[in-house]
Image (tube, rainbow, N blue to C red):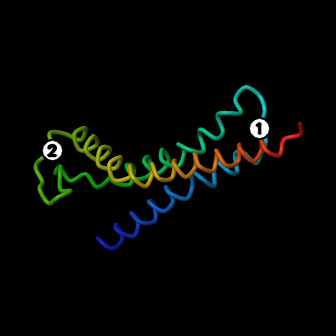
Amino acid sequence: MNTVILLLFFVISGLLVLTPPVAVWRALSRQASGPAAWLYPALALIGPFVAAFVVVVLMWLPAYSGQCGGWLGETSPCRDFGQYATETMFWTAMSMAMPGLLGMLLGVAVLIVVLIRRHLHAPR
């Protein structure tokens, strides 16, 4: 079971790092126009993190056993399901923070490169 969790962690982390740059590149290659054109790159940057967060939290919530904690081996009885859900969301966000931020940083780098290239190759 620990091997499966570790593999899922690496897969989700890899997706969090690689998906935002690819999504930003695709969003900018579509040449959206109009007042909401800025929304597509913004959603491409944050969307993979939000989607992974929701999937991981939904994956862990059915595992409710009445025990909270357990990340470092210490467990204690939960007051209720709300405490378990809160801890699950907190630790999910903490475990995804670094890969998610790296992916967003790479997405911003792609955004900058594409916008610079467009500006340099724009007709004058």
Q: Which residue is mark 2?
A: 78
Which is more toward the observer, 119 or 96?
119
Q: Please determine whether, in this image, residue 81 is positioned above or below residue 76.
A: above
In this view, the residue farthest toward the bottom is 3
Q: Amino acid at mark 2?
A: Cys
Residue 3 point in image, percent of width and height? 33, 74
Instruction: Report the residue at 34% width, 50% height from top.
Output: 92
Residue 54 point in image, percent of width and height? 44, 46
Q: Which residue is mark 1?
A: 32
Calculate the distance from the C-alpha at mark 2 to the C-alpha at mark 1. 48 Å
Q: Quadrant of the C terminus?
A: top right
Q: Nearer the viewer, mark 2 or mark 1?
A: 1
User: 10 Å neighbourhood of mark 2: few (<14), some, or many (≥20)?
Assistant: some
Which is more toward the observer, 121 or 42?
121
Secondary structure beneath disc 2? loop
User: 10 Å neighbourhood of mark 1: few (<14), some, or many (≥20)?
Assistant: few
Q: Amino acid at mark 1?
A: Ala
Which is more toward the observer, 121 or 61?
121
Indicate left or right for 115 with 108 as reference.
Answer: right
